[in-house]
Image (spheres, grey):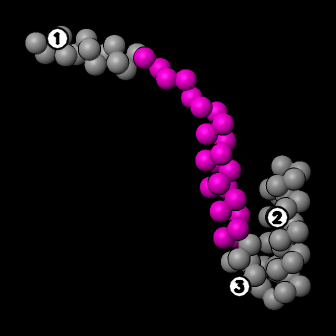
Amino acid sequence: MPNRNRRLLEELDSISLPRDKVHLIESRAQHIIAGATNLVNLIKETYDEGIAEEMERKLLLAIKRQDPNKFNNGLKKLKK
């Protein structure tokens, strides 16, 4: 009996369900947008209005250009 169950479990494991890419993209987008919104709110709570606007602009630019250094460089300048 254990061999029979093992074969059944192995067969079930071998069946791969196709991923629903639209659902995956939607889920990841929701998490990323929620995280970015929380980050922007934290920046606004932490820095004065002028710096917060600049950091938000740098964040959006870093995302648009796919270059996290744009945002990181802005943070480094604030630390000095």
In this figure, which residue is indicated by the disc labeled 2? 59
Which quarter of the picture shows residue 58?
bottom right
Secondary structure at badge 1 equals helix
Residue type at mark 1: give it.
Asn
Q: Is residue 57 left or right of residue 36?
A: right
Mark 2 neighbour class, 10 Å CA radius: few under 14, some 14 to 19, many 20 or more: many
Q: What's the distance in space between the residues labelled 1 and 2, CA to CA?
A: 56 Å
Verify CB contact (< 8 Å) between mark 1 and mark 3: no
Q: What's the distance in space between the residues labelled 2 and 3, CA to CA?
A: 16 Å
**Residues shaded magenta:** 15-39
In this figure, which residue is indicated by the disc labeled 1? 3
Secondary structure at badge 3 equals helix
Residue 15 is situated, as x and y percent measured from the top left of the image, at 43, 17
Q: What's the distance in space between the residues labelled 1 and 3, CA to CA?
A: 61 Å
Residue 62 is situated, as x and y percent measured from the top left of the image, at 85, 57
Q: Is residue 17 left or right of residue 59?
A: left
Of callouts 1 and 3, the N-terminal one: 1
Residue type at mark 2: give it.
Leu
Residue 30 falls within the magenta-colored stretch: yes
Secondary structure at badge 2 equals helix
Going by the picture, which residue comes out furthest to the bottom? 48
In this figure, which residue is indicated by the disc labeled 3? 45
